[in-house]
Amino acid sequence: MNISEMIHKGMRCFDGGTGTMLMKLGLEIGGCPETAPADVMLSIHNAYIEAGAQYITTNTFGASRPKLAKYDLAEKTADISKRNTETARRAASGKNVFVAGDIGPTGEIIEPYGSFAMEQFIEVFTEQALALAEGGADLFIIETMASKEELAAAIEACKSAASIPVIACMTFDRAAQGGFKTMMGVTPEEALSLMQSSHADVCGANCTLSPTDMVELAQQYRALTKLPILMQPNAGKPRISNGKTFYDPIQNIEKVLTDLIAAGVELAGGCCGTDPEYIRLLRKILDRSSREKLQ
């Protein structure tokens, strides 16, 4: 699979939030999302496909060994990643839809600030990447990374596990002094430098930011790289009420998403708070953008 060829063919739309949909379907707060039943995940994948998603993401964001250990499921790490990928593969079967094997942060911090060595990060991500590949992933998507070292380890693991495209995403917030930084202080310039030197196939960002804020970030990305860009913003600004997180709707969302794509974004999807209706609108905007490029 050549990601540039797929983009040229109009394959540009990712799905939206998995956790959001699971919560709507009754996932208990504090429960392990990666153990959701296959029929539930099939319904979520199918809802996104029906809405226009051309890439669906496996329910494996928190399926690394350190994350699953918090639920006493560490020994089922490979099985959970493989099984959830097979479920996504079933949803995509017979359709012009690709399966993105999802890898999220481990929750661990590298030495000397934390207890994890670089070799441990690579080992953890390799275990997960191999299982995703065995389950039938068409590509890898590394999401919500804040640390350069952890992202580098994940890219290396994916590259060694299978010869399929690797999408590398970090998560940024607005810095107090202006611009954007990750929680670990990584700037977009530093992130793009690492992604390119590590031979990621697509550079991206997801979560934390609203679509409005991500337009500016996308413009910075475009100025720093010629690689394809993936942007997956949250639905809006988060608001907590009665222990639950809500995302206030963005005014003029169609214009904001149009501006996001016009900033030079080849691939787009949604993160926290987004749902199939959001993806339906996004697909319409992406298709319109693709038609305009051909004119």
Image (spheres, rainbow, N blue to C red):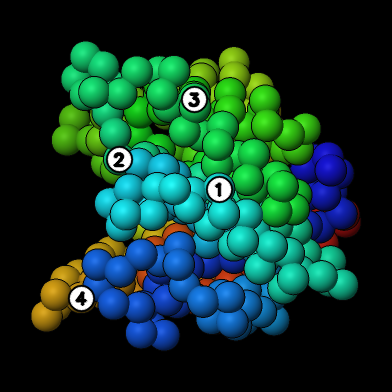
> How far from the left and from the top, in percent, is residue 102?
55, 50
**Badge 3 density bin: few <14, some 14–19, many ≥20, Cα 10 Å:** many
When asked about the image quadrant of residue 172, the answer is top left
**In percent of the image, x 20 and y 76: which residue is there?**
244
* Amino acid type, mark 4: Lys
Determine whether 196 is above or below 278 in the image. above
**In percent of the image, x 24 and y 23: which residue is there?**
115
> How far from the left and from the top, in percent, is residue 246?
26, 75
**Badge 1 density bin: few <14, some 14–19, many ≥20, Cα 10 Å:** many
Q: Report the Cα–Cα distance between label 1 and label 4.
A: 31 Å
* Amino acid type, mark 3: Ile
**Badge 2 density bin: few <14, some 14–19, many ≥20, Cα 10 Å:** few
Tell me if label 4 and label 2 are in contact, CB under 8 Å.
Answer: no
Tell me if label 2 and label 1 are in contact, CB under 8 Å.
Answer: no
**Closer to us: mark 3 or mark 1?**
1
**Badge 4 density bin: few <14, some 14–19, many ≥20, Cα 10 Å:** few
**Closer to us: mark 4 or mark 2?**
2
Determine whether 156 is above or below 235 in the image. above
Residue at numbered disc 1: 78
Q: Which quadrant, please, contains the C terminus? A: bottom right
Identify which residue, 236 or 121, lies in the foreground: 121
- Which label's residue is closer to the chain start, 2 or 1? 1
Residue at numbered disc 2: 107
* Amino acid type, mark 2: Gly
Residue at numbered disc 4: 244
Q: Which quadrant, please, contains the N terminus? A: top right
User: What numbered label is drawn on residue 122?
Assistant: 3
Q: Report the Cα–Cα distance between label 4 and label 2.
A: 22 Å
Identify which residue, 148 or 268, lies in the foreground: 148
Q: Report the Cα–Cα distance between label 3 and label 1.
A: 15 Å
